[in-house]
Amino acid sequence: MPCDGDGDESKGRLKAVNVAARVVAMGLAVASAALMVTASQCTIVLPNGAEAHTVTYSDFGPFVYLVVANAIAAVMVGVAIFLSVWKKGSGKCSKVLVPLLDVTAPALLYSATGAAFATTEYMSYCSPRGRGRVSVCDGTVRGTNNFCSQVHMAMYISLAAAGAVSAAELVKNLKLSFCSSGSDCESDAGCEHGCHHKH
């Protein structure tokens, strides 16, 4: 029978996992943006008594993109969570909006994270005394370890956020596959509206 209790319980569990993955993704996206922003005040001291220089995440375009992308993705995931748990969220608007959010959010996160990882290979700035470029993560420069570690941590968290959104999408597809094989799942309310019997 498509309307047995086990089927409803399985669908309920898949939905719970889907929402949980979205919540995790939203939290990770916020954490990544916050971590990158707090790495913005890093004064490094060059060897040989050269003038100190303050490096910020805003000195690197891809890092700014990572912050913006994570902030936007967090909002998108939050909206998707609201629509997925809202009792009236099965309307036409949400059926169009949620899949769009599910595609856009990970695309933002993956692109921003990839750009940030590519930038770390060339993290440097112009020396205040015009002596060429200085590597931000140069081990001989004091004060860079904290900045570099925070930047890398923010990127890995952003990647984890993208993975969590992808996992939520995978679970949602499993739910849809389960529904299509067992019952009509136009509504998440269960068998009250989701199944139709012939008389």
Image: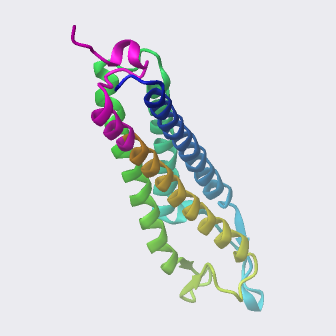
Count of marks overlaid on the render: 0
Image quarter hosting the N terminus: top left
Camera-nearest residue between 163 and 151: 163
Q: What stretch is highlighted in magenta?
A: 173-199
| Residue 177 on image: x %, y % | 31, 40
Camera-nearest residue between 123 and 84: 84
| Residue 46 on image: x %, y % | 71, 84
Q: In this view, does 117 lie to the left or right of 197?
A: right
Coloring basis for residues: rainbow
Establish if 56 lies above or below 89: below
Establish if 147 lies above or below 112: below
Whether the magenta-drawn stretch holds residue 178 is answered as yes
At x 45%, y 45%, the residue is: 168
Establish if 152 lies above or below 31: below
At x 33%, y 25%, the residue is: 185
Whether the magenta-drawn stretch holds residue 149 is answered as no
Q: Which residue lies furthest to the left in this view?
A: 198
Image quarter hosting the C terminus: top left
| Residue 157 on image: x %, y % | 58, 59
Q: In this view, does 81 lie to the left or right of 33?
A: left
At x 39%, y 38%, the residue is: 175
At x 31%, y 27%, the residue is: 183
Q: Residue furthest top?
A: 199
| Residue 13 on image: x %, y % | 52, 35
Establish if 136 lies above or below 37: below
